[in-house]
Amino acid sequence: MAQTNLNIRMDEKLKQEFDTLCNELGLTMTTAINVFARAFVRKQGMPFDVSKGTPNAETLAAIKEVQEMRLNPHLHKTFDSVESLFEDLDNDD
């Protein structure tokens, strides 16, 4: 397969950190970029999620659980003070 050159621009500090990490993983920067390019082509898009910080499945499940608990008064209690919380905890057997 014929080889070609690719020139890219990036922040110098990012390049240094990228090079260091590649070396720690036993890769060259060229190999890492090629791995990314192959994954990008194979997936026909980014090989990882690009989002504004959408919660993962575990976090979404926890949020749903809390919302359901708030709707069911038998699944949660509220307290007026820390003392009343501890008193309730002491009374639970």
Image (cartoon, grey):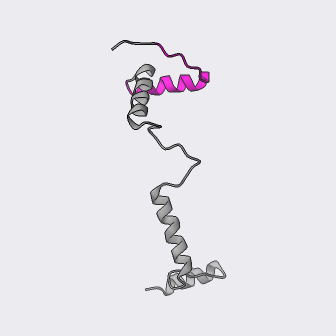
41 w.r.t. 52: above or below? above
14 w.r.t. 59: above or below? above
The residue located at (45%, 59%) in the rendering is: 58
First to last magenta residue range: 5-26
Which residue is at the far left? 1
Residue 81 lies, in percent from the top left, at: 66, 80
Residue 93 lies, in percent from the top left, at: 43, 86
The residue located at (57%, 26%) in the rendering is: 14
Is 86 left or right of 32, judged from the image as shown? right
Instruction: Report which quarter residue 77 is drawn in.
Output: bottom right
Residue 76 lies, in percent from the top left, at: 53, 80
7 w.r.t. 89: above or below? above
Q: Nearer the viewer, residue 28 or 56?
A: 56
Residue 5 lies, in percent from the top left, at: 47, 13
Is 88 left or right of 23, judged from the image as shown? right
Looking at the figure, which quarter contains the N terminus? top left
Which residue is at the far right? 80
